[in-house]
Amino acid sequence: MRRTDADVIIVGAGPTGLMLAAELRLAGVRPVVLERQPQLRTVPKANGLGGQILRLLDYRGLTGRLGEIGVDAGPTAAIPFGGLHVDLSPLADSPLQAMHLPQPKLEQLLDDWSTELGAEVRRGHEVTALEQDDATVTVEVHGPDGEYRLTARYVVACDGARSRVRGMAGVDFPGTTYPEVNRLGQVSVPDSVTQLDNGDLEVPGHGTVAAGFTRTEHGVFAMGSLAPGTMMIQTTEDTTADTDDNEPMTLAELQDSIRRILGVDLPLGNPIRLSRYQFQARQAERYRAGRVFIAGDAAHAFPATGVGLNAGMLDAINLAWKLAADLHGGAPTGLLDSYHEERHFAGARIMMQTQAQVALRRGDDPAALALRALFQELVTDEPALRRVGALIAGTDLRYPLPNPNGHPLTGTVVPDLPLRTCQADTRVADLLHTARPVLLVLADRPDLHEIAADWAGRVDIHTAANDDRPADALLIRPDAHIAWAATVDEEPDSAAAAQRDALTHWFGAADVRAEAAVS
């Protein structure tokens, strides 16, 4: 086999690329990350994490680190959806967990974690060309010391919605760019303005500016509070002119937009964050082109906030263990292709709900007003409210995996069950810190142990008890998705055949020489 400089070249050191680098290192793979910007970004493109990704980061043991840099972590009482305010507070348990965490702090955490694990991150290195054959991929790079070439078994494009690598690989990015221009500002509350307990503002000479969404014939004004003494403001206006997201936005530009929409000069304090963007609805037609894979914003652009960053990091977690299995020589046929199958499916579902938000927020004719009124009525019902919360969180996602006994957990992220072992009390999250496959046996089933022993070199086997076990056993992939579950009290012969099929399907043929690693 041709010599390579790395196992995987990752282009782009945003959250998706850095998450992928860390996951690959956990799996014993040598990644090199190439980032064209010379330094970590300081201006946040996103302002927090929410939904399923928080559980996955907990499963990697990062909750403590996140708690040191994030604030307001926990269940979310309200969410914006399509320009409307959805109140989750009537639910006893919110389906959406969130944390306020500016993207630069998240990127610093992931940079630190991935480099501690041994990943190499090269900043100020821009990929200018790419070529691939049946065995390797070679990229041409412009770095601080000049031009050079780098060869690896695989390349992953994590270089954003304008991905050059995606274009070099010949992958189309079809979809729509909407005419809305969104201006976002996180600012301090000036002394001349009074912030009321309900979040409204009392503005001298004007009166009350309401928190939440205010729609006028000129656009939409949205306001909320992230922390005491600060407010988050967003304006949305249609435009026919091109906008440049890379051109820095000023406080005056945001104030001008507020004046056009509300007809009010709203005093604003010192800016903490200012940004401008247009919504797109685009999805790469395929997430793999030979030895090039597409992930994060390079693979999808959604027309709503709060989902893109989370989806990209979940792409990385799904892809890493599959690349590692292939590089280590144990990948079953079709494993790498399952990355496109699963994450394109997930992206399409996110696209569905974010484009539904477009339909809700755009238009002011009677039909659009009726749609918004009907939606607001529907989300006063608990089932509808839970479904919308789960859609935003991504917790409703279920991959269409082989499922011979129809177990409802197959294809979903494993719940963080409390566990009792002969050594100590623990939980599922503690078993997944190393990003290895796990067979968790929750019943007195020596037959399941005996079968799994032939895969013990690739799958960690744990026995534990749970007071309300959802299955006799769970086969958990490194990305925390359940590949197979043995129904409680399922017939041994039926379970044995399905268990062997699942182990073979995801982790390759049995190795009868494996020595069981059982705890």
Image: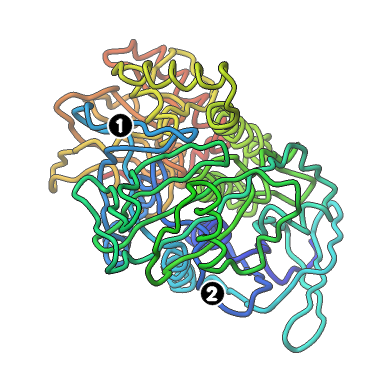
Query: At which x and y percent is residue 490?
Result: 32, 12
Relative to 515, say whether 354 is above or below: above
**Left or right, residue 293 beside residue 16:** right
Going 24% across and 29% down the picture, which residue do you hit?
A: 442
Relative to 250, say whether 75 is above or below: above
Query: At which x and y percent is residue 365?
Result: 59, 22
Residue under pointer 1: 87
Q: Quadrant of residue 113?
A: bottom left
Q: CA distance from mark 2 to mark 1?
A: 36 Å
Residue 40's label in the rendered image is 2
Of residues 486 and 361, the one drawn nearer to the viewer in this rendering: 361
The tag earlier along the polypeptide, 2 or 1, is 2
Residue 269 in sight: yes
**Quadrant placement of the C terminus:** top left
**Left or right, residue 460 beside residue 248:** left
Residue 28 in sight: no
**Left or right, residue 22 beside residue 11:** left
Q: Crowding near pointer 1: few (<14 within 10 Å), some, many (20+)?
A: some
Q: Crowding near pointer 2: few (<14 within 10 Å), some, many (20+)?
A: some
Residue at the far front: name it.
205
Query: At which x and y percent is residue 133?
Result: 86, 55
**Left or right, residue 13 beside residue 395:** right
Query: At which x and y percent is residue 67?
Result: 27, 61
Of residues 147 and 239, the one drawn nearer to the viewer in this rendering: 239
Q: Amino acid at mark 1?
A: Asp
Residue 77's label in the rendered image is none
Residue at the far bottom: name it.
145
Q: Quadrant of residue 414?
A: top left
